[in-house]
Image: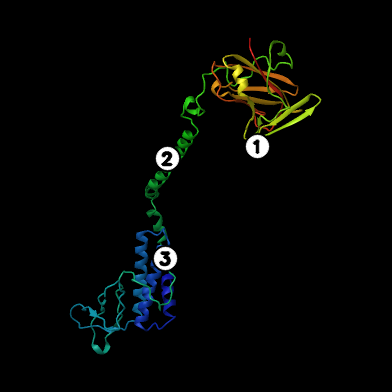
């Protein structure tokens, strides 16, 4: 007994199999179970589904023939006519409209009525699926049953080229959208970071006077001068002294504190993690003395004990321009770090500033500032 027949017969045993209406519900439940099993298996092809329906139809026909009464052969002449079944005929499976009553075939030779052989009525079961499940029909599991040889016919229908052909457009669309999104993000960041901007467009600072220094962002040649080496040729004007730190400004993440040791008083500055610099005011009166002249600035400094550092210096002298960016390697010994500026011949409208970053590499190193001064070249 195959799996289909066993499933149907087990269902019939759960009720009154002699009741035609009950058998009809069982057959319809079998079709419903088969339909659910086919839908749950995406690998089942159309051809295999048709064969499974025909297999269950054949089994229902075979099983139903056991419940139909035998009928006598009709007259000896001619073929047996089709007989329309009455209330005891095989159930027709409905699909929304009433199927005609199945025809029966009477076979066997004509005999006298008293000894006429009896023939089985073979029901015709339509190859259809029921519109809805019957709530009172026994449940039938048709997930496993399959006619012999059906599995062998599944593989030829799974044409991988057709599968790839159906999926290729989705893959291509996904890759295209991904590449376009990546290109768009890259272009957005390139624009935001100014990759396509000129140097002039990147400079967002207010318009200033024409450059008045020879170089930008450089370490003056010859290294730092020894303390006092420049005193003989210059008349110095004091810009900053540790005795008056009121004109020093340190951002919130930077520090500036006056300290003293055997070398004298100094201001220890330490730039913040953001690279913020400490500002030293250059009074307007000092700038008025420098207008139209060639001036030399002198920063006397050293690094924190045991930690050499790279300091950078920027200036903002208002209407008199700036000094460019300077960078010095500051060691543990006190030295003088010089830079010169040629100022335009105009009256400054305000004070200026000299900003010093104690650690250009942003490693939190400190620098000790002893003095900042300026003199005019003869």
Label tally? 3
**Distance between the Cα atoms at labels 1 and 3?**
71 Å
Question: Marks 1 and 2: which is nearer the front?
Answer: 1
**Image coords of residue 367 (percent x, y):** 71, 28
**Viewer-side residue, 273 vs 101:** 273
Q: Which residue is mark 3?
A: 37
**Image coords of residue 189 (percent x, y):** 48, 36
Q: Residue at x 48, y 30 (%)?
A: 195
Q: Quadrant of residue 306?
A: top right
- Above or below, 130 against 292 in this view is below
- Above or below, 166 against 93 in this view is above
**Viewer-side residue, 342 vs 72:** 342
- Residue found at the far right of this picture: 262
Q: Which residue is mark 1?
A: 253
Q: Which mark is residue 359?
A: none
Q: Residue at x 37, y 54 (%)?
A: 157
Q: Which residue is mark 2?
A: 180
């Amino acid at each position: 007994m195959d799996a289909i027949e066993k499933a149907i017969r087990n269902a019939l045993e759960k009720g009154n199999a002699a009741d035609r209406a009950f058998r009809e519900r069982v057959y319809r439940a079998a079709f419903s179970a088969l339909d659910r099993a086919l839908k749950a298996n995406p690998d089942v092809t159309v051809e295999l589904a048709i064969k499974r329906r025909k297999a269950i139809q054949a089994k229902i026909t075979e099983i139903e023939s056991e419940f139909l009464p035998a009928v006598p052969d009709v007259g000896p002449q001619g073929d047996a006519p089709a007989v329309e079944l009455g209330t005891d005929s095989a159930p027709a499976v409905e699909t929304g409209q009433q199927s005609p009553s199945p025809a029966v075939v009477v076979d066997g030779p004509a005999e006298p009525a008293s000894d006429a052989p009896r023939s089985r009525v073979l029901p015709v079961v339509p190859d259809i699926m029921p519109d809805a499940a019957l709530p009172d029909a026994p449940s039938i599991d048709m997930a496993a049953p399959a006619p012999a040889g059906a599995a062998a016919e599944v593989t030829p229908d799974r044409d991988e080229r057709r599968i790839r052909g159906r999926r290729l457009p989705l893959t291509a669309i996904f890759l295209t959208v991904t590449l376009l999104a990546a290109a768009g993000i890259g272009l957005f960041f390139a624009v935001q970071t100014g990759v396509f901007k000129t140097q002039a467009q990147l400079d967002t600072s207010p318009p200033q006077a024409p450059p008045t220094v020879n170089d930008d962002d450089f370490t003056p040649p010859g290294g730092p001068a020894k303390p006092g080496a420049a005193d003989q040729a210059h008349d110095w004007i004091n810009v900053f002294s540790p005795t008056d730190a009121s004109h020093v400004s340190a951002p919130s993440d930077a520090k500036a504190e006056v300290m003293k040791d055997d070398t004298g008083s100094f201001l220890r500055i330490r730039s913040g993690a953001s690279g913020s610099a400490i500002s030293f005011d250059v009074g307007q009166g000092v700038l008025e003395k420098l207008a139209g002249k060639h001036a030399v600035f002198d920063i006397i400094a050293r690094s924190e004990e045991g930690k050499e550092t790279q300091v950078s210096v920027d200036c903002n002298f208002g209407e008199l321009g700036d000094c460019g960016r300077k960078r010095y390697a500051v060691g543990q010994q006190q030295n003088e770090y010089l830079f010169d500026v040629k100022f335009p011949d105009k009256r400054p409208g305000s004070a200026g500033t000299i900003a010093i970053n104690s650690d250009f590499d942003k490693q939190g190193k400190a620098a000790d500032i002893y003095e900042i001064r300026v003199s005019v070249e003869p």
